[in-house]
Amino acid sequence: MARVIAVIPARYASQRLPAKPLVDLLGKPMIQRVYEQVQQATLPTRIVVATDDDRIADVVRKFSGEAVMTSPEIKSGSDRVAAVAREIQGDIFVNVQGDEPLIAPEMIDEAVRVVLDDPSAVVGTLVRKIESTEELLNPGVVKVVVSADCDALYFSRSVIPFVRDVHDQLQWLQRHTFFKHIGLYVYRRDFLLSYAAMPESSLERAERLEQLRILERGYRIKVAITQHDSVPVDTPDDVRRVIDILQTKR
């Protein structure tokens, strides 16, 4: 049986929301909320928080989670996961974003199965159908074009594809199915380590999307379409939104 390690990168510094992993969400820090969601998934065999700050590590250990210290110089979440993969034995490593306190455990299992079910896949991720024009036009929502074989063709903050014959973008959803990217990555260990050693690519720099480093070098990113959604936390407004959702579930 494959050893599936779920890694939650958690940096202390954040331009828009400092100390984000420690933000209180109805009595629990956000990192604990994420950890507890991952615990409900069935396929990960181990969960690790990869952090650059003792304050986060202390909080994780306080709720009996496992924390690994990584360099504060690491720039991306996947690079932080790779740092863990160098120290911990595993076959498949899952990068679970540390700012997704409402991530559905089913999403984690869906993403892992992308790689488990396809021996040729070295990296997998999830996409979801875009259902509102607001999402479609929001550059904070990463769009992805998917092939007939469920490979990602390109990711962009722009609206892709461009619907040429419909001038009003408000009508584009009626003419084409668009997908947004769910930032959940699953890597085979060997590929993860080689990916982390690759220099930043030009497309990655342009879009500020680390997954483009993979496509630009000719590797496949296998995707699955999920019906689940999540609410990433980047701003104080996002915090209030998540708290409102958590209160309705009480």
Image: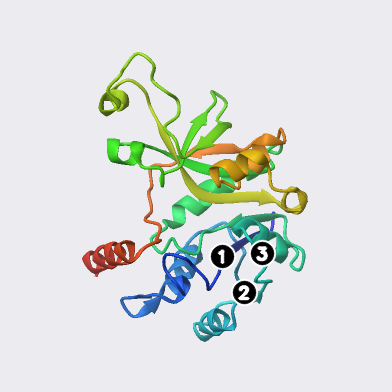
Name the quadrant containing residue 177.
Answer: top left
Residue 230 relative to residue 21: left or right: left
Identify the secondary structure beneath mark 1.
strand
Q: Amino acid at mark 3?
A: Ile
Tell me how far mark 2 sits from mark 3, CA to CA: 9 Å
Q: Nearer the viewer, residue 20 or 42?
A: 20
Residue that numbered label 1 is attached to: 8
Q: Are marks 2 and 3 in contact (CB under 8 Å)?
A: yes
Q: Which residue is mark 2?
A: 52
**Place of residue 208 in the rendered image (x, y in percent of width and height, measured from the top left):** 55, 47
State the image quarter where residue 220 is shown: top right
The quadrant of the rendering that contains the C terminus is: bottom left
Graded by Cα atoms within 10 Å as few (under 14), some (14 to 19) or many (20 or more), the crowding at tag 1 reads: many
Q: Is residue 117 visible?
A: no
Closer to the eye: label 3 or 1? 3
Tell which residue pokes out farthest to the top in this image.
165
Crowd tier of the residue under label 2, counting other residues whose Cα lies within 10 Å: few below 14, some 14–19, many 20 or above: many
